[in-house]
Image (cartoon, helix red, strand yellow):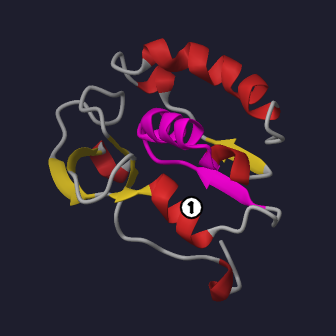
Amino acid sequence: FEPEPYNCTVLNRPAWINSNKKIKFALGTDSVGASLYTNGIYTEGSETIELDTFDFAEYVLQNINSGDYNILKIDIEGSEYEVLRHLIMSGTACMFSEIDIEFHALYSNETSHYWVTETALSWFLESCGVY
């Protein structure tokens, strides 16, 4: 909850690695969760929808001042691995002072191999001052 509306921006499109790409999201069963992956513990056999994306690294470059104390909270239902890789490769991950992430590797067989990424990511980001 953000009590001051000017402190946040709500974008009604999913963050991704490029703009205007359509990606499918599986809607969770019983109104629980959503995911890029249709075989997750909450999304197996569920309905899917297509959404237009925006390039999150581009958004960061256009809207974030790297000299500020910037905090990024990521809970993007399976998209975090691709988006984080894009932020790191573009150099925009280092524009944040803190990055808090909800990972989803263990929720799907399709993402279980990312568990190693979760383990090493904080060590990697510390090298550019992100905690």
Q: Amino acid at mark 1?
A: Val
Q: Could you tell me how many numbered marks the image carries?
A: 1
> How far across and down, in percent of the image, does residue 35 sit?
34, 41
Q: Nearer the viewer, residue 16 or 51?
A: 16
Q: How far from the left and from the top, in percent, is residue 43? A: 28, 36
Residue placed most toward the observer, 113 or 94: 94
Magenta span has 75? Answer: yes
Relative to 111, say whether 62 is above or below. Answer: below
Looking at the rendered structure, the secondary structure element under dot 1 is: helix
Q: Give the percent coordinates (x, y) of residue 102.
A: 59, 40
Q: Residue at x 69, y 19 (%)?
A: 120
Residue 130's place in the image compared with 45, above or below, is: below
Q: Which residues are magenta?
A: 70-92
**Where does residue 44 sit, x and y in percent of width and height?**
24, 30
Q: Which residue is labeled 1 in the image?
A: 60
Q: Is residue 73 magenta?
A: yes
**Which quarter of the picture shows residue 3?**
bottom right
At x 30% / y 45%, what residue is drawn? 28
Looking at the rendered image, the quarter that the C terminus falls into is top right
Nearer to me, 72 or 1: 72
Residue in the image at 73% along x and 57% along y? 71
29 relative position to 55: left or right: left
Q: Quadrant of the N terminus?
A: bottom right
> How packed is label 1: few (under 14 Cα within 10 Å), some, or many (20 or more)?
some
Residue drawn at (59%, 37%) of the image: 88
